[in-house]
Image (tube, rainbow, N blue to C red):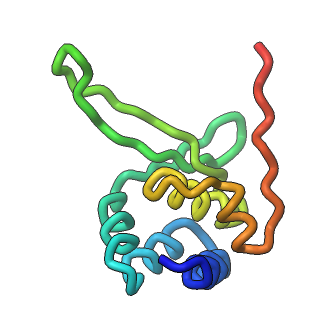
């Protein structure tokens, strides 16, 4: 995908109100690789209330070394966050595009997540 096409797609995705709408748009993308990647994610998101926030997680089930199914959960964004959070995650996970590059294509500033100190 050309950089111009990528920027136009990211900008259009960021106009969507939420993750489900952005995912729908990705599924109908003219770029077959992008559409297939989006289709592969259908049904893998879960919403959970944690510490008063409605968090959206990507949930997958894979077999571990013992052959047992294990659930993996990754926090993507909170409900109501800017859709760029999902868009940047999608292109990072599926196409190895740095999140910062997706934010730049959308004309937004990427903030590195703060590390939690324990």
Q: Position of residue 55 (x, y in %)?
A: 61, 47
Residue 60: quadrant of the picture: top left
Residue 39: quadrant of the picture: bottom left
Q: Position of residue 79 (x, y in %)?
A: 65, 57
Q: Is residue 101 above or below residue 35?
A: above
Q: Nearer the viewer, residue 103 or 79?
A: 103
Q: Residue at x 52, y 60 (%)?
A: 91
- Horizontal relation, residue 46 to residue 83: left or right: left
Q: Is residue 71 above or below residue 64?
A: below
Q: Residue at x 46, y 49 (%)?
A: 46
Q: Residue at x 40, y 43 (%)?
A: 59
Q: Position of residue 12 (x, y in %)?
A: 61, 83
- Horizontal relation, residue 98 to residue 93: left or right: right
Q: Residue at x 71, y 56 (%)?
A: 100
Q: Position of residue 70 (x, y in %)?
A: 30, 26
Whether residue 5 can be seen here: yes
- Tally of marks: 0
Residue 99: quadrant of the picture: bottom right
Question: Where's the C terminus, which quadrant?
Answer: top right
Q: Nearer the viewer, residue 5 or 54?
A: 5
Whether residue 16 can be seen here: no
């Amino acid at each position: 995908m050309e950089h111009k096409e990528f920027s136009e797609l990211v900008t259009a995705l960021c106009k969507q109100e939420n993750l489900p709408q952005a995912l729908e748009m990705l599924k109908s993308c003219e770029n077959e690789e992008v559409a297939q990647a989006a289709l592969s994610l259908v049904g893998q998101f879960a919403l959970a209330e944690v510490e008063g926030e409605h968090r959206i997680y990507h949930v997958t089930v894979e077999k571990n070394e013992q052959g047992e199914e294990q659930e993996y959960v990754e926090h993507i964004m909170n409900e109501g966050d800017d859709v760029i959070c999902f868009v940047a995650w999608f292109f990072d996970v599926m196409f190895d595009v740095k999140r910062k590059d997706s934010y730049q294509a959308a004309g937004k500033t990427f903030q590195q997540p703060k590390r939690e100190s324990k």
